[in-house]
Amino acid sequence: MTVAVIFTSRLAIAHDDDYEEMSRRMAELVREQPGFVSQVSVRDPHTRIGITVAYFEDEDSVRAWKGHGEHVQAQRRGIEEFYSEYHVTVAQVTREYDGPR
């Protein structure tokens, strides 16, 4: 069953080149992870609130991504430097569909 990791955050400042580079690198790196399915990410420039949803094949794939060395470093930097707040939800996807057709 597919697992979704929902990461919601608020940037502490409006723009930071280091953060942008780290964010791009994480998006690139996660796509290389075994069990990765897809990802979508958005951020409101006014509130600085962002949401990233990454889908994985299973919980083991999620755990492997959470523990990936470069990702661990990025998590630490996010906590110490970039985010004023964040929240992570890991959920099993029980149903999905597309539209409008």
Image (tube, grey):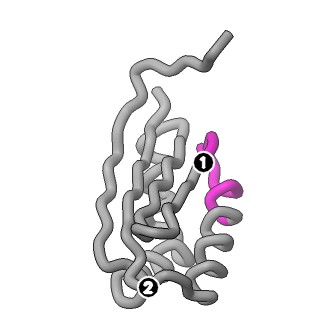
Residue 76 seen from this side: no
> Residue 40, percent across and down?
59, 48
Residue drawn at 54 percent across, 36 percent down: 57
User: Per the image, is 62 magenta?
Assistant: no
67 and 47: which is toward the camera: 47
The residue beneath circle 2 is 13
Q: Nearer the viewer, mark 2 or mark 1?
A: 2
Residue 39 seen from this side: yes
Seen in the image, is 13 located left or right of residue 29? left
Seen in the image, is 77 located left or right of residue 85? right
Q: Residues within 10 Å of mark 2 (few under 14, many from 20)?
A: few
Q: Residues within 10 Å of mark 1 (few under 14, many from 20)?
A: some
Seen in the image, is 86 located left or right of residue 26? left
4 and 50: which is toward the camera: 50
Q: CA distance from mark 2 to mark 1?
A: 24 Å
Q: Mark 2 or mark 1: which comes first in sequence?
A: 2
The residue beneath circle 1 is 39
Which amino acid lies under the numbered mark 1 shown in the image of this protein? Gln
Quadrant of residue 42 within the rendered picture: bottom right
> Residue 85, percent across and down?
29, 72
Considering the numbered disc 2 on the image, is that residue within a helix, a strand or a loop? loop
Residue drawn at 63 percent across, 49 percent down: 34
Residue drawn at 68 percent across, 10 percent down: 101
Seen in the image, is 80 located left or right of residue 38? left
> Residue 9, percent across and down?
38, 66
46 and 8: which is toward the camera: 46
Which amino acid lies under the numbered mark 2 shown in the image of this protein? Ile
Considering the numbered disc 1 on the image, is that residue within a helix, a strand or a loop? strand
Task: Say above or below: 43 vs 100.
Answer: below
Tell me the magenta residue range: 29-39
